Amino acid sequence: MNTPTILRSGLVGTLAAAAFALGGSAADGHDGLPVANVPHANPRSGIQDNVLTPSASQTSVAWGNLPLTNPDTANGVTHYGYNTLDGAPLTQTKNEAHKTEPDKNVYLVLGGRHYLYQGHEIGPRGYVTRVNLDETDPLKRVTLISDTDTAGEAYPTIDGITWNPFTRQLLLTAESSAPKGGVFAVGLDANGDAVDGGKATRLPALGSGGYEGIQNDSDGNVWIVEDIGGKSASGGKVPNSYVYRFVPTDRADLTKGGKLQALQIERRDGSPATASQLQANPADSFLGLLHTYGTSFTTKWVTIHAGTTEAFDATAAAKDADATPLKRPENGVFRPGTGFKEFYFTETGDTSTSSTLPGAYGGVFRISQATPSADAGRISIAAVGDKEHTGLDNIAFATADDLLVVEDAGDGLHTQRGALDSGYVYRLGTGRGQDERSYAVEGGHAPRPVRFLAEGRDASATFDAMAGPAYNDGDNEITGIHVSDGDPTVAGLLGAKPPKPATHPVWRTFWTQQHGDNTTWEIHWNGS
């Protein structure tokens, strides 16, 4: 099994396709996305290679020590995965440079070129990079798009990112509590280059909170998923994060403001499940029912703020409006073929096997509505997490029915499980827009996760996990799973078209092996 060769003594890495071997796997058909189950996660011991399902291979498209073609040297923004402001080396030493952790991916075809954009999650400052997938020279492949705001100052590190075709902007989320967190925008021109010098504009009307997932619907609304861990309780955490929808006054200009709404979930008696209730009693039976496959609950969108004022604390406003907090929801995407009437999002859970709370292992939830702008709908759990499938984070549809979900369980849970992270395919039911029971598959049982990726641990992450500096994370994690044909128009919104990556080469699949070498990969499925 091969991994990309990273030359630690220099700046050049080599592109390497990987060959993968596994045994004893059971085949599972996924319409055009043939997946055989990888039987085991990699153990958390030493250096491990990534293992993909036999129908897939991957190539590295970027890695941490690639230099930027246009660095901001004065601020240390010089490499794809490192900030070198302190002059520290790009190597495995106690004082190695700060790693910046490229996170979610956005694939766009602009000006006839094929680009992959990322925000960077940690380090001294936030920034956005672009990988030119057509460039064969690695030293010329990665460009800095933005690392300053409209005032010329640094902005927070970036976790979530999406492309808004209505405004022709990358929307970036900072996963920090108010007042630091929130949504920023960076415009791109027709050639994929930054406009206005790449200055990022804060969008105060969208609020300030620990935002991560962000996605547009066909009406131009912006859906935001928040990830802020709550206070400790019974070995876990109380629910403390919300799902939001921003309804703009003008979908072509988000600076004109609009309404920020938060999701409220009703109990069986019609009363809202509120933060005051669930935080006072994190063992509330409602949470157990919410995480039970086959149940569903009425939802409402409650407006928590309107206007264009300075950034406000969205988390506090959602709590005051009796919206319903969840256990660290992280990322979401619309299901293709539903007319943006179904939104799926992950819930990470407590990332600890010691938690005795209901919903400790999270899962994947589905919000169903009559229209994307409807005021009410229903929520149900589409896949229930357990000890072996938890810490669910990034999410993407690979076909209309095949949902890719990847883990970010963290070093603590890796130790408890003795295993590293995995990526799964969930084959969903086909009852789009109908009664919740019509989604059941396999004789009425919840969809069974099929492992398509057993993530490894590269040498750099192994060093960081064992003896590296505290400011750099340890084990690798899976992030940035992304399937797109690169269409930058409204017709190319994620969820507008059914993806076909196994049969149509215009559909491309990417993921980032965050931490360690910070390698971003492209997956190639048989037939594409």
Image (cartoon, rainbow, N blue to C red):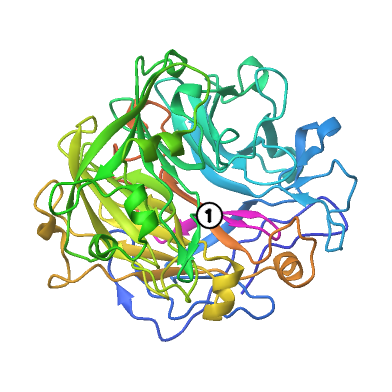
Judge whether residue 516 is colored magenta. Answer: yes
Residue toward you, 514 or 415:
415
Residue 21 in the image: state x and y as whole percent.
Answer: 52, 78
Judge whether residue 344 is colored magenta. Answer: no
Residue toward you, 380 or 59:
380
Residue 243 in the image: state x and y as whole percent.
Answer: 36, 42
**SS of the residue at dot 1?**
strand
Q: Is residue 384 left or right of residue 173?
A: left
Q: Residue at x 66, y 23 (%)?
A: 149
Can residue 319 be seen? yes
Residue 252, picture quadrant: top left
Q: Residue at x 38, y 57 (%)?
A: 280
Q: Residue at x 45, y 37 (%)?
A: 316
Q: Give the residue pinned by disc 1.
A: 479
> In the rendered structure, which segment of residues is drawn in magenta?
512-526
Q: Is residue 70 left or right of residue 511?
A: right
Can residue 500 be seen? no
Answer above or below: position of 146 versus 255. Answer: below
